[in-house]
Amino acid sequence: MINTPDKKKVLVVEDEPLIVALLSTALTARGYEVTIAEDGEKALELVSKILPDIILLDLMIPKISGYDVCKTIKADDQFKSIPVIAVSALAQQIEINRALTAGVQEYVIKPYKMSALLEIIRKYV
C-alpha cells in the first residue's frame, strides 16, 4: 500500500510477538500505518521520530514500563496530545487507576475483541 499523507500512524508498543502480528495485520488491513516498539526505550525513541496519531501501549514491557512511557509522553508539550490507549492483561482496578493517572485515555484489558479495540482507535483518530 502506498503511504499517503492522510494515512493515520499507529505506534504499537508490545513485546508479545503474536499480539504484534495480530494488531499489525488488523490495523494495516484497515489502512493504518503501523510501527512496532518492543520495549519502552524504543517506544520513546519512535514517538519523536514518527509522531504517531495514536499509541497502543502494553504496560508490562521491557526496559521502561508502559506507565513511565506514558508519563514521559504526557509530560512533553510536543507529544502530550497524542492519545495513548493502554492494552494490558492487568485487570485490577489499582493498575487501571495507575495507568489513568499516568495519562492514558482508555484502558483495554487483554484478551479483547479486535472490533472493540478498533472502535476505540477510530474514536481518537
Image (tube, rainbow, N blue to C red):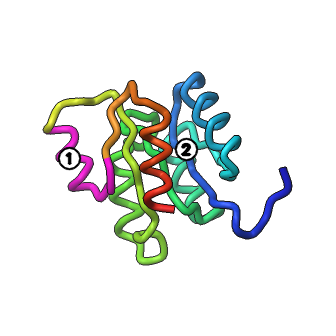
Residue occupying image coordinates x 21% and y 55%: 101
Q: Is residue 88 one of those drawn in magenta? A: no
List the residue tagged with mark 2: 12
Q: Amino acid at mark 2?
A: Val
Q: In the rendering, at what x and y percent does residue 105 appear? A: 32, 56
Tag 1 secondary structure: helix
Question: What amino acid is found at the position of numbered circle 1 in the picture?
Answer: Arg
For residue 78, side relative to residue 108 (left or right) = right
Q: Residue at x 46, y 65 (%)?
A: 82
Where residue 21 appears, as percent x and y from the top left, is 63, 29
Residues under labels 2 and 1: Cα distance? 20 Å
Instruction: Rate crowding at label 2 as few (under 14), some (14 to 19) or many (20 or more) other CA atoms within 10 Å.
Output: many
Q: Give neighbour class at mark 1: few <14, some 14-19, many 20+ (Cα, 10 Å).
A: few
Residue 120 vertical placement versus 53 (above, below) = above
- Measuring from the top left, give residue 109's x and y in whole percent: 32, 33
- Kindly give the residue lying farthest to the left in the view shown: 94
